[in-house]
Amino acid sequence: MEQNENDRQERKDKECTFEVNGEKWYNRKNPNTFPYPVLATIVFLLLGFIWDLWHPGWMVFLTIPVYYGIVNAIKSKTISYTIVVTIIYVAIGLIWGLWHPGWIIFLTIPIIHWFTGKR
């Protein structure tokens, strides 16, 4: 009887246990912890497998930095220069169809960040 208890104790000591704390990786009050890239991947796969829209579907991944940029803008109550440039680029492309020369405005982002000292 005592041998069985010792064996159980030895097995228990050898067991690998871990705790999962949900607050470490996801907090409902903090939208930055929402796994948006996982959601974007699911949407991409659904678009591809169901409607065979693999080519335009990849653009879903472009919404990932936009999502986190908007969340950070709302949290800090300031709008990012990068988001403003992206909105201007999309507007220039959709309204006037100037996608090609319009991309040049993205070159202003590192210049502005260099002058303002942001990283």
Image: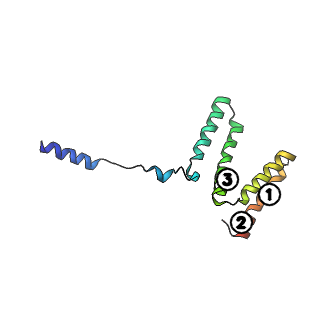
* Secondary structure category for the residue under label 2: helix
Q: Amino acid at mark 3?
A: Ile
As drawn, which residue projects farthest toward the right?
A: 96
Among the two numbered marks 2 and 1 on one chain, the one whose residue lies closer to the N terminus: 1
| Alpha carbon separation for disc pair 2 and 1 | 13 Å
Residue 99 in sight = no
The residue labelled by disc 2 is: 113
Locate the C terminus by quadrant: bottom right
Q: Amino acid at mark 2?
A: His
Return the x and y of residue 63 as percentages of the image width and height: 67, 47
Residue 24: tell me if it is visible. Answer: yes
Q: Which mark is residue 105?
A: 1
Identify the secondary structure beneath mark 3. Answer: helix
In this view, the residue in front, 10 or 32, is: 32
What type is the residue that disc 1 sits on? Ile
What is the x, y in percent for residue 11?
Answer: 24, 45
